[in-house]
Structure formats: structure tokens, C-alpha cells
Amino acid sequence: MIEAVERLIKNRFLSFEDFVNIKNCGKEETEYLFSKSREQAREYYGNKIFVRGLIEFTNHCKNDCFYCGIRASNRSLNRYRLSEEEIIECCKNGYSLGFRTFVLQGGEDGYYGDDDYVRIIKRIKSDYPDCALTLSIGERSRESYEKYFGAGADRYLLRHETADEEHYKRLHPKRMSFENRMRCIRDLKEIGYQTGVGFMVGSPFQTDESIYKDLCFIKETSPEMVGIGPFIPHKDTPFAEYARGGCELTLKLLAIIRLMLPSVLLPATTALGTIDPMGREKGILAGANVVMPNLSPVMHRKDYALYDNKICTGEEAAECRFCLSRRIESIGYEIVTDRGDYKSP
Ligand code: 5AD
Ligand code: FES
């Protein structure tokens, strides 16, 4: 098994057999894997952890993904939208807490048109010129992506969700298309965004083969960021009764991705912190180098539940900021006030 890790480091890639070897390996080998992935992250980023302030600005969504708590068919949540002023207020609060990246994340909400996004992006970039702005607002046309980029957006997160088309069809209703998602990711890269892809670990119907396809897709695409976290069921979705993804497998995948793409920006996600009280710390010790606490107003937090039992829905931004500092320092790392741009390998 140790040889599988050595091959992964040497080739910056792994065979299906080596993936399965690593997936099934025991404690000792897992520790070896994590020591290598951790070392790899330190080579580029030292003991620095980047923070991104997440602003969940709308939970309206026209899509109906089977796994997601804010899917259009879910009638048992309060829908909300932040006004432009409220969004700016979140940035202001975040800036004073040391955030230099803001992530605007929302459902696919038809209420905001391109002109609204362009105005908001320009405003944030002119009020906070030393900050990076990340968008995470789903599938749009190439022209829209170009407009947002032109207005100053730096980065875009659009998880591919699964690189296996048949699997994609089992996670999404018919009217959503794998092909369009792939088109979006291609466009984002071509336009020049620092682009993030990603997937859920342990989503229903996921197999070793489909995970391996995710790894191949990630390697080929060579994104600047990769967001992965465990699937966690949400009670008001068709997947309510499915099992959640595993912590151990998520950590191994973080480590594999770190070793495949040595300088990639890799968050220890809130979902990972939700299934294990030490999940984010473990993620960092497996090679993650980003955390994304929430800057959204506390009154709306519970209504942005993509999955059940999401952590940090009752804490103010400042509380999470200091809680995370403490947690990260306790494992020998530190949060930095920095845009935290991607470093080319
Ligand atoms: N469990 C874990 N992650 C989820 N996401 C959506 N629903 C869930 C869930 N039930 C993830 C998706 C999406 C990102 C914003 O959150 O991968 O891209
Ligand atoms: Fe939110 Fe700890 S990070 S309470």
C-alpha cells in the first residue's frame, strides 16, 4: 500500500487498482498517506490556512437536485434573499475580521439578472479592492460568465458533482444536464477564472468506479480549487433515507487530490466538520489548506441548510472566525489575512 502512495507521488496520478488499495488500506498506511499529503501542502503554503468568507445570499433555487435541502420542491423552509446593502454589510463585517476573499454563494435564483450581478460585483471590488471575489451561483451562459469576469469576479466554484454521466442522472432530475455542467466548467476555465470543481463523497449510487472517474476528471481539468465533502442526507429530500458519506474516505480523497495537484486550493469543508466534530482539523492534517466560515446573517443561516445538522448556524461570523483560529492553532497552523491566491506548481 505504501508503494501505491509512492507511485501516486511519483506519477501525480494513480491507477484504479492503486485507488482501491488506498481506499481499503489500514491505519498505518493511512497515516503514511496523510503525512505525505500534509508535507505536500506545507511545501507550497507552509502552516498557513486561507479563510474565505461565505455569503449565502439567496436560498431560492430553480433546480431540484435530489440531494439538496434548498431544492425547488422543498416547501418546508423559509426562502430569503439578501439585498445588495445586506451583502455589502456582510463584506464589511468580514473585512474587519480579516477576510480578504468573499464567496457569493446562492441557489440558482432567477431573481438576480446579469445587471444585478455586475453591479454587485463592481461595488464589492471597488469598496474592497484588496479582496478576491468568488462566485458560486451555478450554471449560466458563457456570456454571463464573461460579464461577471469583466466586472471583476476572480474565481468561480461549480462542483461537477460527479464525473460519471449515469451517476449524474441518478442525482438530478431529467431537465438538468451533465453536458451543460461540463460546458460551464470549460467556459469558466477558458474565460480565466480560478475555477473550483468538486463532488460529494458517499452520495447515493456512488461507486469506486465513479469516484475514480472524479479523480481522472480532476486531474484532466487541473482546477485551481477542489471542494469535496461527505454527502449528508437532508430530511426533506428524496435522499432522506440514504447513508451519509464517510469521514475516513473523505480524508483519503483530500490526501489523494493534494498529491495529484500539489498546489491546489483545498477546503476542509463545513460538511466534514458536521459529520465529525474534529473533521475540519483532520481535513487540514490530510492536506487541506482552506476553510470557509459563514458571513451570512445568523437569522438566515438555518434556511441555507443543504443537509441536516449543519454546524455554525447559530454563531456570528466573529464567533466562527475566532473558533476557527483556535482550532487551527491547536494543530500547529494559522489563519492568514490574505487573498490566498492559487500558486502555480
Ligand atoms: N450533503 C453534502 N453536500 C451537499 N451539497 C448539496 N447538498 C448536499 C448534501 N445533502 C453540496 C453540493 C453543492 C454544494 C454547494 O453543496 O456538492 O455543489
Ligand atoms: Fe463556527 Fe466553530 S467555526 S462555531
Image: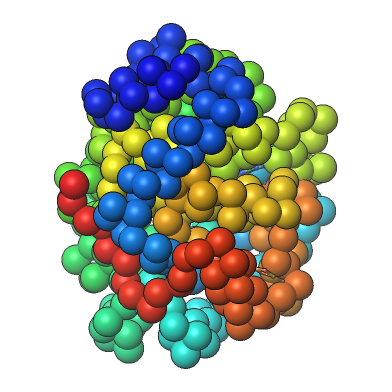
Q: Residue at x 52, y 26 (%)?
A: 29
**Closer-to-camera residue (95/42):** 42
Q: How is the image coloured?
A: rainbow
* Picture coordinates of residue 251, whole percent (x, y): 55, 38
Q: Quadrant of residue 98?
A: bottom left
Q: Residue at x 32, y 72 (%)?
A: 339
Q: Residue at x 59, y 67 (%)?
A: 330
Q: Quadrant of residue 290?
A: bottom left
Left or right of 241 on screen, residue 19: left
Vertical arrangement, residue 249 with respect to residue 20, above or below: below
Left or right of 144 on screen, residue 330: right
Vertical arrangement, residue 176 with respect to residue 89, above or below: above
Q: Quadrant of ligand 1?
A: top right
* Picture coordinates of residue 341, whole percent (x, y): 27, 63
**Closer-to-camera residue (203/153):** 203
Left or right of 30 on screen, residue 117: left
Q: How many marks are shown on the rendered structure?
A: 0
